[in-house]
Image (tube, rainbow, N blue to C red):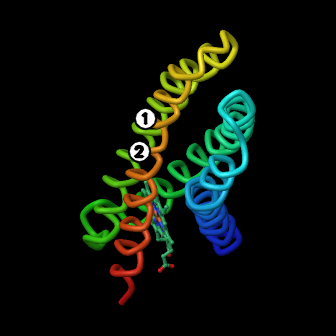
């Protein structure tokens, strides 16, 4: 029974990390440059707002699943016995979650308001701030994976 729970916890943890990190890589390196090349602001900015809205809803679920499963796995071993890599992963993961909350709760709403008002320069400026913070979170995400791998015996 406990090995089934462990399986589900690790599966949930990795699925959450894959959805979050993979989605950021796709949005940053594929969707955004393609949209910039092909579409003018009145088409591009509503598309980005729509696409990011769908992605961020999934990420909100992934973050809860990732943090909850990670903390559960960590506490099974105990903070005192946990390798340094797990402590680093906890710190990085919590920082990523705070940054995501700011993106979704603050910047994304501002993006939607600017797009609804058809204020394209304002929308582009907010989207650029989102891009920078997604890049920061993507970098942190890869550091978290490195921290996880470093903890292997
Ligand atoms: C609150 C934050 C987090 C905590 C407490 C946490 C905790 C853990 C723990 C305890 C494990 C070991 C599971 C086991 O093998 O029994 C683990 C594995 C892993 N975590 Fe995290 N984690 C967190 C966030 C993240 C984030 C943000 C990422 C990447 C985006 C990540 C990626 C991974 C990966 C790839 C593994 C598998 C490592 C391996 O099997 O060698 N974790 N995590």
Q: How far apart are marks 1 and 2 (CA)?
A: 5 Å
Q: What element carries label 2?
A: helix
Residue 123 position, x and y percent, is 56, 24
Is residue 138 placed above or below 103 in the rendered structure? below
Nearer the observer, 10 or 14: 14
Residue for point 41% across, 44% down: 132
Q: Which of 116 and 93 is in front in this view?
A: 116
Residue at 44%, 71% (x, y): give it. 145
Residue most extreme to the top: 117
Q: Name the residue under label 2.
A: 132
Total marks drawn? Answer: 2
Q: Give the numbered dot on residue 129.
A: 1
Q: Does the residue labelled 1 lie within 8 Å of ligand 1?
A: no
Which residue occupies the foreground of this view, 72 or 145? 145
- Picture coordinates of residue 125, whole percent (x, y): 46, 28
**Quadrant of the image containing the C terminus:** bottom left
Q: Are marks 1 and 2 in contact (CB under 8 Å)?
A: yes
Instruction: Identify whether 101 is placed above or below 147.
Output: above
Q: Residue at x 66, y 72 (%)?
A: 7
Quadrant of the image occupied by residue 85: bottom left
């Amino acid at each position: 029974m406990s090995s089934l729970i462990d399986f589900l916890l690790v599966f949930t943890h990795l699925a959450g990390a894959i959805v979050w990190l993979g989605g950021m890589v796709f949005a940053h390196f594929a969707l955004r440059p393609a949209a910039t090349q092909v579409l003018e602001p009145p088409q591009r900015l509503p598309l980005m707002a729509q696409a990011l809205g769908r992605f961020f809803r999934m990420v909100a679920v992934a973050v809860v699943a990732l943090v909850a499963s990670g903390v559960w796995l960590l506490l099974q071993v105990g903070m005192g016995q946990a390798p340094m890599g797990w402590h680093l992963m906890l710190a990085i993961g919590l920082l990523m979650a705070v940054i995501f909350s700011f993106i979704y709760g603050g910047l994304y709403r501002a993006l939607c308001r600017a797009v609804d008002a058809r204020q394209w320069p304002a929308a582009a400026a907010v989207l650029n701030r989102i891009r920078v913070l997604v890049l920061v979170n993507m970098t942190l995400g890869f550091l978290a994976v490195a921290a996880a791998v470093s903890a292997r015996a």
